[in-house]
Image: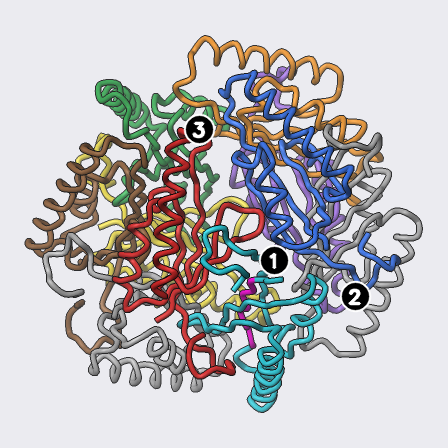
Chain colours: A cyan, B red, C blue, E orange, F purple, G green, H brown, I yellow
Amino acid sequence: MLFHVEMTVNLPPDMDAERAARLKADEKAMSQKLQREGVWRHLWRIAGRYANISVFDVESPAHLHDVLSQLPLFPYMAVEVRALCRHASSIRDDDR
Amino acid sequence: MLFHVEMTVNLPPDMDAERAARLKADEKAMSQKLQREGVWRHLWRIAGRYANISVFDVESPAHLHDVLSQLPLFPYMAVEVRALCRHASSIRDDDR
Amino acid sequence: MLFHVEMTVNLPPDMDAERAARLKADEKAMSQKLQREGVWRHLWRIAGRYANISVFDVESPAHLHDVLSQLPLFPYMAVEVRALCRHASSIRDDDR
Amino acid sequence: MLFHVEMTVNLPPDMDAERAARLKADEKAMSQKLQREGVWRHLWRIAGRYANISVFDVESPAHLHDVLSQLPLFPYMAVEVRALCRHASSIRDDDR
Amino acid sequence: MLFHVEMTVNLPPDMDAERAARLKADEKAMSQKLQREGVWRHLWRIAGRYANISVFDVESPAHLHDVLSQLPLFPYMAVEVRALCRHASSIRDDDR
Amino acid sequence: MLFHVEMTVNLPPDMDAERAARLKADEKAMSQKLQREGVWRHLWRIAGRYANISVFDVESPAHLHDVLSQLPLFPYMAVEVRALCRHASSIRDDDR
Amino acid sequence: MLFHVEMTVNLPPDMDAERAARLKADEKAMSQKLQREGVWRHLWRIAGRYANISVFDVESPAHLHDVLSQLPLFPYMAVEVRALCRHASSIRDDDR
Amino acid sequence: MLFHVEMTVNLPPDMDAERAARLKADEKAMSQKLQREGVWRHLWRIAGRYANISVFDVESPAHLHDVLSQLPLFPYMAVEVRALCRHASSIRDDDR
Amino acid sequence: MLFHVEMTVNLPPDMDAERAARLKADEKAMSQKLQREGVWRHLWRIAGRYANISVFDVESPAHLHDVLSQLPLFPYMAVEVRALCRHASSIRDDDR
Amino acid sequence: MLFHVEMTVNLPPDMDAERAARLKADEKAMSQKLQREGVWRHLWRIAGRYANISVFDVESPAHLHDVLSQLPLFPYMAVEVRALCRHASSIRDDDR
């Protein structure tokens, strides 16, 4: 099932540069692993902001929570979640 | 280029039923035409609300405005637009 | 799976009394049917407001949307949905 | 009587890890004690956020305040309280 | 127990004058009855607004809801409720 | 004249414990002195929050400002002030 | 004593033109009477909006409420009131 | 001097079509006259909304108010005004 | 021309006392100089808050910005500016 | 294509003065380079605030994001982006 997730990252500007770089690299690696597994179905940058809009395909809300709360940047994120479903006007049979 | 659009429909509950049905049918037809053309790339229902989250692939902001302002339900919509771009962590080469 | 739903009902104060009564009776009947089926797991009144806090146990976001959008008072409701899951500190094994 | 409580925890990301772990363990122990006593009737995680939705069954607003203000994480919480009562459409005789 | 209630009245400016006067008179009568019974403990006007701040002394949230929802102006009110309790710095032994 | 004051205290969780205790003791002493003088007419805790709702009986807005700005916790408070007056439906002759 | 009042007027655009003109003329007359009496000390238009910022010099919050609630446009206004006092950095001895 | 003005138009969807068309034509004519005179220096559509962002070059706030309040669609607009000035990093000598 | 300015000062409670005192003394001196010059026409304290409401009489928005941005407390202020003009109902010929 | 960008700068008041000066100088240099290239088409100060309103002329949302995220002050900015297009009432043929 699909969830629409908007993540805004609030890293403190004075964080140690090396630590910030490592956090971002870890975040990228985990994000790409989840994308390859099909869990993180879409990932877009919101132009002009350190934020993204994502669509997750998970088995349950608990699955979603596990995935999000284990992201390396999670402690620095404001996260907004909304449940999605197929729209009656969609030309597709599934929820793509 | 991609725009993230959230549309919330506020039809007056006492609108003439036939007129409401016709508006919704026209909206569905135009939405499906735009989906088939690849302009309305994604369309999801937000669970529990008369609202959708959509991703449009258009040539310019002007193109986006033309498409949205000609939707039959546009006069009844609250619309929020945000420009998207490829995320640096995406596993894809394009903006899918 | 569980969803937390807050419904605020905005019936126009000058609605025909008979129509309002019928809408409320229909809403009550459907609500009780869903409660007996286990779909509408909890239903509480928010003291002092024409609003409720509910917990739904559904198969999917799509199931939730079908249930909510078919409520007789749905066109008059402001609805806020949040996905719930078992809390790690819960003393229960399931999501009760 | 029932109160609906939404708690959002804002632990500073740079808190000493050992201290954070001890605070969370203390919080969990007190939460489970209150759950076993029937005071903390429901406890759910809001998917994707370090926050919960809870229902407390207490003797009075003063009782509720005592319970909440003694939680180990209380100084780090944003708390929203709303009084609940049995809904007229409930199929139960009490406030479950 | 005490609840702090803020009521903002939104009567449509074009309501029939006689009906508005009757509603207000009925509201005043019921308010004064509840004040004499000790249920509506305090009632103040917010200067410059058609709104009041009140303190109710009721037996339960359900009691509060019954009282508020039967006010003649309730369908035209925005109501905000907060549970109060004795403050640890109060010089009184009770919740006055 | 009466003013309705809502104070929310935001003490930093990592404030030195002794200093916090002294600030709170000073605040309590000054609050009780003002209560005994009749200036701080009502003081209630908002259940579940480090906040209070108070009613002050002062000679002027300047008097109110002097009283509030000299509270030991004032630098840590968010304060919201509203002017009150006797309500036309009150059963009392004065502003109690 | 002084109160800062911000009034935003929301006349329905389709109000009968004659009635709107009469309301505005009555409002202007009462406003000018109050200005001449020194009660309505300052009156400024907020550029670009049907709204004003005013300073009233009244005897009490009750006086302020009487004045505001008798304005012909009061039923169409959103009103925000704040109590003012002399600033410690003012070069004047009074509250001008 | 320059003012940044954001106008959101809220025409009722059920307004008589002919009257709406006349209002819009009158608005366009007045807008173009003001643009030719250099008063309405910039006018852009916000993509996806019935709203514009404009920059006015006027002699005073009073001038701005006269211009805005005489627009045919003014009674249907929500208007937000902000004063602009030359930015210290601008490469131009004036406020273009 | 006139601008309505609301300034809220957010000095960190743990700022060095001597530095805070010096900042406030400098602010007071500059404020009084500007008042004597007629630029800072009105200055009022908002009762109960570390905030003021002011009216400035300046030559242009640029002049206003220069004045405000050079205040010693400017880096600690949240500032809200609105342009004012003479109200059509004012009994005065100018903008007092 | 055009984007309307509002940037609010939140430099910590206690930042090292030299570092703040260098950041601002770097920001100014990059801003002027982008202005000369025609990418940063307009830049205005919002009077009374450490904020600007800008119009960017870029090739795509991705281009906009690259430009904004490389500004030296970007980590200290709150940024709001809106897509613009030519307004149907504009007297110009292009989007100026």
Q: Nearer the viewer, residue A14 or G29?
A: A14
Disc 2 designates what residue?
A: F18
User: For residue B14, which numbered disc appears in the image?
Assistant: 3
Give above or below for I23 relative to E5.
Answer: below
Q: Position of residue H64 (x, y in %)?
A: 19, 48
Disc 1 designates what residue?
A: F75
Residue lying at 70% horizontally and 53% vertically, measured from the top left: C59
Q: Amino acid at mark 2?
A: Glu
Specify whether residue G93 is painted magenta: no
Distance from the alpha carbon under mark 1 to that under mark 3: 52 Å
Distance from the alpha carbon under mark 2 to that under mark 3: 63 Å
Circles 2 and 1, Cβ within 8 Å, touching? The answer is: no
Residues shaded magenta: A4-11
Q: Amino acid at mark 1?
A: Pro
Q: Amino acid at mark 3?
A: Asp
**Outermost residue toward the front in this view:** A93
Q: Nearer the viewer, mark 1 or mark 3?
A: 3
Residue lying at 26% horizontally and 45% vertically, measured from the top left: G47
